[in-house]
Image (spheres, helix red, strand yellow):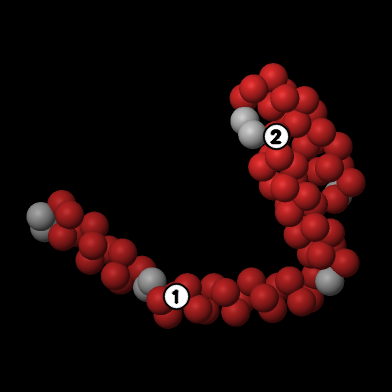
């Protein structure tokens, strides 16, 4: 899967070389994604544990109730 992502990103890089985006940034983005996919495929249990820890931290820092309160305030309700 990681190799497929690298191949797909090569096509995107060619289009970007036509001036659509900064190629250097795109290459860094593609490599970052490829490394992330590779890590998940080779250690899925660790990836699930990391995702769960992140989910719990985000729930603590930005609970849905706060998002709803902010939306209602913005709507004047």
Q: Position of residue 32 (x, y in %)?
A: 73, 54
Q: Position of residue 11 (x, y in %)?
A: 79, 28
* Between 26 and 44, the one nearer to me in the picture: 26
The image shows residue 41, relative to residue 46, as above or below, that is: above
Residue drawn at the location 42% of the way across and 80% of the way down? 60
Q: Which residue is mark 2?
A: 23
- Residue in the picture at 75% in, 42% down: 27
Instruction: Tell me if mark 1 has few (under 14), some (14-19) or many (20+) residues whose alpha carbon lies within 10 angstroms of its own.
Output: few
Q: Examine the image and state in which quarter residue 53 appears.
A: bottom right
Locate residue 67: give its quadrant. Answer: bottom left
Residue at 24% across, 57% down: 71
Q: Which residue is mark 1?
A: 59
Q: Residue at x 81, y 65 (%)?
A: 39
Q: Quadrant of residue 44?
A: bottom right
Residue 18's place in the image compared with 41, above or below, is above
Spot the residue most to the left. Answer: 76
Q: Is residue 21 left or right of residue 70?
A: right
Front label number (1 vs 2): 2
Q: Is residue 68 left or right of residue 32?
A: left
Using the image as rendered, state which of residue 23 and residue 40 is in the foreground: 23
Within 10 Å of the Cα at label 2, are there few (<14), some (14-19), or many (20+) other Cα atoms? some
């Amino acid at each position: 899967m990681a190799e497929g992502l690298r191949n797909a990103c090569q096509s995107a890089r060619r289009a970007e070389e036509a001036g659509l985006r900064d190629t250097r940034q795109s290459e860094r983005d593609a490599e970052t994604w490829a490394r992330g996919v590779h890590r998940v495929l080779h250690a899925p249990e660790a990836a699930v544990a990391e995702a769960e820890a992140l989910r719990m931290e985000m729930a603590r820092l930005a609970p849905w109730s706060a998002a709803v309160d902010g939306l209602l305030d913005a709507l004047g309700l």
